[in-house]
Amino acid sequence: MRALRAIVADDDPLVLPVITTVLSDAGFEVLRATDSDIAIDLLERSEEIDLLFTDVVMPGKVDGLGLARVADARWPSIAIVVSSGRIVPKPQMLPMGAVFLPKPFYADHILWFACRALGAKGKRLPETGDQ
């Protein structure tokens, strides 16, 4: 079974490596994006992406909510986690099945919310011997 692939889009140099490390440790192959333009480029150029984990407030042509909507419209099988410490989006602002993780959060919240989003798309983490 192939490793799940994730794109983490966050412009905070303290938050991006934390999310990346947690997902990598859980077995994800992780690609990083520091703005929405890079994230969309990665989505367009990469083979199947299973998870998009995006901050709301970040640079690029669209914010994180716009990025989530673009990803959902163009790649509907992608599980989406949207995070922010500045706003709490109304449920109708999120794509169907996307989950919202408020900041600040603990590292274990990252994986729990990622699993929730994957479950909404009928996906789950592969079983490993050390889980």
Image (cartoon, helix red, strand yellow):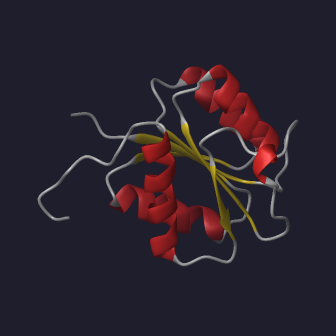
x%, y% of residue 9? 66, 49
Figure check: 49 above or below 7: above
Of residue 117 and residue 74, the one placed in the foreground of this image is: 117
Residue 28 located left or right of residue 73: left
24 relative to 80 in the view: left or right = left
The N terminus appears in which quarter of the rendering? top left
In the orientation shown, which residue stands out farthest toward the left? 129
Q: Quadrant of the C terminus?
A: bottom left
Q: Is residue 30 visible?
A: no
Quarter assignment of residue 89: bottom right
Dividing the picture into quarters, in which one does residue 3 lie? top left
Report whether residue 109 is seen. yes
- Give the residue at x 54% y 78%: 106
- Provide residue 30's location: percent of width, then percent of height: 46, 47
The picture places residue 84, in percent across and down from the top left corner, at 75, 64
- Write the residue at 85% across / 65% down: 87
Give coordinates of residue 49: x percent, y percent: 48, 32
Please tell me which residue is depicted at 65% across the width and 30% down the height of the picture: 72
Q: In the rendered view, would you say 69 is above or below 56?
A: above
